[in-house]
Amino acid sequence: MAIQKLLQINSSGRYEGSITRQVSDLVVKYLKEKNPVLDNVSRDVAAGLPFVNEAWINSNFTVADERTEDQKKVLNFSNELVAELESADHIVIASPIYNFSIPATLKAWIDLIARAGLTFHYIESGPEGLLKNKQATIVMASGGVPIGSEMDMASGYLKFALGFVGITNVNIIDASTINYAGDESLHDANTQIAALID
């Protein structure tokens, strides 16, 4: 699938020395080398996102053409996040594992983009994701929870949440297995990334 637009989401609370940030940058670099015209949009959620509250819920569940101006304002940021996701062909999500799951700020992002009528809808058999024909790469790292183990409640959740909105082509990269330190290992890192994405 040709990639025209890429959305990169970082969520690590660390900036200096963050493994997920460094490896997600390598993933983006690799994708850009394969797609020279790639348009890259970055969204850093680490500083915090608004949590879903009563005003947001009431606004979201009000029929769009019946919303007040205040309700529209409440949903403006959520609409912006949804628009970024809708326009992206490939999504790169970088997430450490904090206490067996994803950072709270990344969970807030998911809450804000999971919108009935926008990113999923209900059919006779149940909910159906509306964000079709997209690919996602999840870059994960943990200080002690093996990715894919019974203790890892992060990677499965992220994969399920993306699938819920229709993004089912998902690769997971265990960033702790990527050797990216120094120029000599850069080729090896790119080789590992290529094998996991392609």
Image: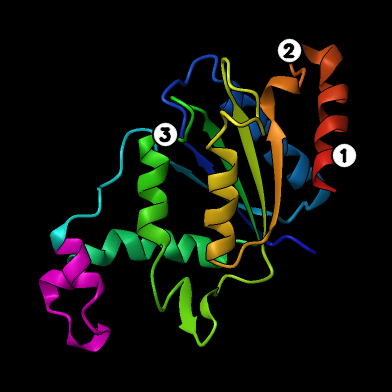
**Could you tell whether 113 is left or right of 193 in the image?**
left
Query: In the image, what residue type sits under mark 2?
Result: Ala
Residue 156 position within the rendered picture, expressed as x and y whole percent measured from the top left = 59, 44
**Could you tell whether 33 is left or right of 28 in the image?**
right
Going 66% across and 28% down the picture, which residue do you hit?
23
Instruction: Find disc 2 in the rendering and name its residue.
Output: 181
- Marks 1 and 2, how far apart at CA: 19 Å
When the figure is inspected, residue 55 is found, relative to residue 171, above or below; the finding is below
Query: In the image, what residue type sits under mark 1?
Result: Ala
Q: Tell me which label, 1 or 2, sits earlier in the chain.
A: 2
Residue 79 position within the rendered picture, expressed as x and y whole percent measured from the top left = 35, 66
Q: Nearer the viewer, residue 119 or 40?
A: 119
Instruction: Find disc 3 in the rendering and name its residue.
Output: 103
Between circles 1 and 2, the one closer to the viewer is: 1
Residue 196 position within the rendered picture, expressed as x and y whole percent measured from the top left = 81, 40
Residues at marks 3 and 2 touching, judged by CB atoms closer than 8 Å: no
